[in-house]
């Protein structure tokens, strides 16, 4: 398995598999920033919107490939705030439902952190629905849970849920 950066053409090439990732995530109760109910057309539109905003050093789309098979993805977005250019947000981490629990998520997160380091970023943050598997996985990956905001986002079920916020400082490698 390898992790590659997709440009807009790469996103379009893998559009079906990328859309399936989002549908799998919604089926698992994880919204990944998208409102319910998510259709395949809605998932494809979300990726095309992402593709249109890709820009090296600012918004980077990583994907894990097993041969030609796209099995997971993660997005890195550098802050546009003038006083936050050292900071990036990890978004839309997702692995195909049938491929989870075998290291693909760790591989993607390691690649995203490495890419962030290569851009000179010194702080990463992310949020995820609280009390989910993802909420437990980030701690396992070395991230610090800084707190929870109630009623933060809609779940695929349509219910509002709390999100947990995490950060990872990149300044020291130890
Ligand atoms: C979250 C997700 C991307 C993780 O991908 P994955 O391929 O299953 O993760 P991995 O197999 O690489 O596991 C990563 C680490 O978390 C650990 N882990 C897995 N499930 C866990 C759980 N429920 N509790 C605690 N740790 C867990 C693994 O043991 C592994 O740690 P290790 O490398 O030290 O053994 C995947 O489950 C997914 O796509 N879920 C649906 C979408 C989602 O929730 N995305 C996150 C949105 S913020």
Image (cartoon, grey):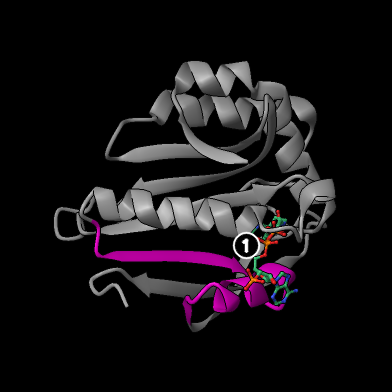
Residue closest to the eye, 107 or 112: 107
Q: In the image as oriented, which residue stretches furthest toward the left?
A: 82
Say what secondary structure mark 1 lies in: strand
To which residue does mark 1 refer?
153
In x, y percent, where is residue 141? 54, 72
Q: Is residue 42 left or right of residue 111?
A: right
In x, y percent, where is residue 39? 79, 33
Q: Is residue 86 above or below residue 18?
A: below
Number of residues whose C-alpha sits closer than 10 Å to that of mark 1, classed few (under 14), some (14–19) or many (20 or more): many
Reply yes or no: does residue 129 show up in magenta. Answer: yes
Please name the residue shown 47% across and 57% down the image.
110
Which image quadrant for residue 48?
Answer: top right
Residue closest to the eye, 13 or 4: 4
In x, y percent, where is residue 102? 74, 58
- The span shown in magenta is 121-144
Please name the residue shown 50% across and 74% down the image.
165
Q: Quadrant of the C terminus?
A: bottom left
In x, y percent, where is residue 103? 67, 58
Please name the residue shown 29% across and 68% down the image.
170
């Amino acid at each position: 398995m390898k992790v590659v950066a997709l440009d807009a053409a790469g996103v379009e090439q893998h559009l079906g598999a990328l859309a399936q990732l989002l549908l799998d995530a919604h089926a698992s109760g994880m919204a990944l920033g998208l409102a319910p109910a998510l259709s395949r057309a809605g998932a494809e539109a979300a990726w095309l919107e992402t593709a249109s905003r890709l820009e090296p050093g600012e918004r980077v789309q990583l994907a894990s490939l097993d041969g030609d098979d796209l099995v997971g993805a993660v997005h890195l977005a550098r802050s546009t705030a003038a006083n936050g250019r050292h900071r990036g947000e990890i978004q839309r981490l997702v692995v195909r439902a049938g491929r989870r629990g075998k290291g693909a998520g760790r591989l993607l997160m390691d690649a995203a952190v490495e890419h962030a380091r290569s851009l000179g970023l010194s702080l990463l943050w992310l949020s995820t629905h609280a009390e989910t598997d993802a909420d437990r996985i980030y701690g396992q990956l070395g991230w610090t849970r800084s707190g929870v905001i109630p009623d933060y986002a809609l779940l695929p079920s349509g219910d509002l849920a709390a999100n947990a916020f995490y950060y990872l400082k990149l300044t020291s490698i130890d």
